[in-house]
Amino acid sequence: MELLQELLQVSAQLFKHLTMLPSDKERDDYIKKIDDYLDKRGTIIEQLQQLEVNPLPGHPFEKQLRELDKGIRDRLQKAKKEIAEDIKNLQKSKTSERRYVDPYSSVRVMDGTYFDGRK
């Protein structure tokens, strides 16, 4: 039962951590802390799976753990989408910057003729 209480604590900490979204400067620390919490939860869950009898069914913590797990999954998806959107915007800005620096990079010139390399 001690493992279930520890799992509940780590899950609650992760859920609380996922409620606040960081600024861009703090994002690396935010992601690292999420990874640490997920690693802790993973090791506790592995220890629970190695037991002969699953202590979760019928335990008073079962409902709380299931609700926390659902909330954690939803918030992780939200954080993942936000990070993916930021990466997409960064790639777009890099492409725009390259086009601004060298606007004729897509034009090939051969003996007085040119071929437009844009696709």
Image (cartoon, rainbow, N blue to C red):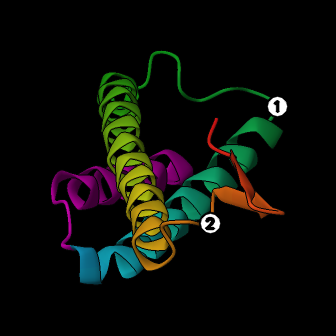
Please tell me whether residue 20 belongs to the stretch shown in magenta.
yes
- Relative to 30, say whether 85 is above or below: above
The image shows residue 92 at horizontal and vertical percentages of: 42, 55
The image shows residue 70 at horizontal and vertical percentages of: 36, 26
Residue that extends furthest to the front in the rendered view of this protein: 112
How packed mark 2 is, by other alpha carbons closer than 10 Å (few <14, some 14-19, many 20 or more), is few
- Quarter of the rendering occupied by the C terminus: top right
- Relative to 9, say whether 66 is above or below: above
Circle 2: residue type: Ser
- State the CA–CA distance, disc 2 to disc 1: 65 Å
How packed mark 1 is, by other alpha carbons closer than 10 Å (few <14, some 14-19, many 20 or more), is few
Q: Residue at x 74, y 47 (%)?
A: 46
Q: Is residue 30 left or right of residue 88?
A: left
Please tell me whether residue 98 belongs to the stretch shown in magenta.
no
Q: Residue at x 29, y 51 (%)?
A: 12
Magenta region: which residues? 1-23
Q: Residue at x 45, y 79 (%)?
A: 101
Q: Pointer 1: what residue?
A: 52
Of 61 and 12, the residue lying toward us:
12
Q: Secondary structure at mark 2?
A: loop
Number of numbered markers: 2
Closer to the chain start, of discs 2 and 1, is 1
Which SS does the magenta portion mostly show? helix
The image shows residue 93 at horizontal and vertical percentages of: 38, 63
Q: Secondary structure at mark 1?
A: loop
Q: Pointer 2: what residue?
A: 105
